[in-house]
Amino acid sequence: RGRVKEHFQLNADIIGVNHPAADAEIIALTTSIIKTAGLKDEEFVCVINSRELLQSYLEFLDIKKKEEVIRIIDAKGKYVQNAIEADLIKKGFKSSESKVLAQQFRTIWQQDPRKEKNYPDIESKSDLAQYLDKLMIIEEKEVKAALESIGLSPEQTSKVYDFTLIKGIPQDVIVALKSLEVGDRVKLAIENMEELLTYLESFDVIKNCEFDMSIARGLDYYTGVVYEFLDRTGSVARAIAGGGRYDQLVESFGGGKIPATGIGMGETVLHSILKKLN
């Protein structure tokens, strides 16, 4: 479904604390809210990345158009959806039907990009089943084309795309990140992510979290950790909630240098999931 014109929104922020414990507390609070509303641990996930890590890695690759790259990474799901929608229209599907089907494939891509589940409703239709096996191929083709279109070299494009594939259990992701040959700034950002991991464990929400290097949060004001809470039931593609650290935002409006981290969530996505489950 699309965005509604009017909805209630919940926001939570911690102002004045430049410490990963604050980020972990916001994540823990949001986890508690979602579970209290009725979702179980296996029905949602908090995916976490770091804009500090992403930007320092792009600098290490000598990429100048960092914000443009981040916006492309942030729109990976939309690239998959648009490519499938265009292909379905070429094959004779109506525009409205193509849009709905492409949205469904995007939801599958978000839940299960490597197709580890069965989808009998789609697999029974030969003209649709082919897309299930091609979701990662479509993603790679479309994202790499977008990166090269803004001037990245083939080598830079491959390294950026491969970096976005690093995701999973936080401890495993830290191991994978530490195996990369990178500069000191990137190593420091990885250490900061590892410190966040320890606080997520302290708040007992590590089981609800994954580290995902493809999470970017397109807004330019994020400076550190970024996170999104995603549905794992296959009900919706949109995030339940999202936020991150924005240490320079207050200063950009003429205030002092005040660190901050926070999250926002509307009730509509969570309500849609609960309605479908019940």
Image (cartoon, helix red, strand yellow):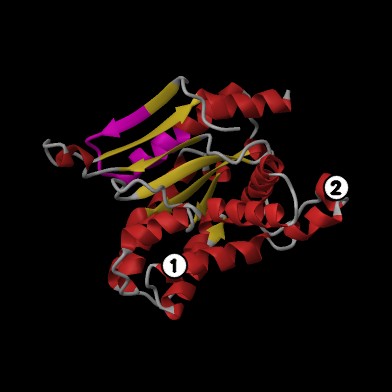
Q: Nearer the viewer, residue 107 or 59?
A: 107
Q: Amino acid at mark 1?
A: Leu
Which residue is drawn at the image coordinates 51% and 64% (left, top)? 143
Occupied quadrant, residue 169: bottom right
Q: Position of residue 264 (x, y in %)?
A: 41, 31
Question: Is residue 196 found left or right of 35 in the rendered image?
Answer: left
Three-letter amino acid code at disc 2? Pro
29 w.r.t. 22: above or below: above
Q: Which mark is residue 147?
A: 1
- Report the residue at 51% width, 25% height from top: 4
Q: Secondary structure at mark 2?
A: helix
Judged from the image, the secondary structure of the residue bearing numbered disc 1 is helix
User: Mark 2 or mark 1, which is nearer the start of the sequence?
Assistant: 2
Read off the magenta span. 12-28
Q: Is residue 224 left or right of residue 94?
A: left
Image x and y of residue 197, in percent: 44, 50
Residue 150 placement: quadrant: bottom left
Which residue appears at 61% of the width and 51% of the height? 81
Q: Is residue 272 above or below residue 204?
A: above
Q: Nearer the viewer, mark 1 or mark 2?
A: 1
Mark 1 vs mark 2, CA separation in Å: 34 Å
**Picture quarter containing residue 148?**
bottom left
Magenta stretch contains residue 199 = no
- For the N terminus, the quadrant is top right
Can see residue 183?
yes
What residue is disc 2 on? 120
Q: Residues within 10 Å of mark 2 (few under 14, many from 20)?
A: few
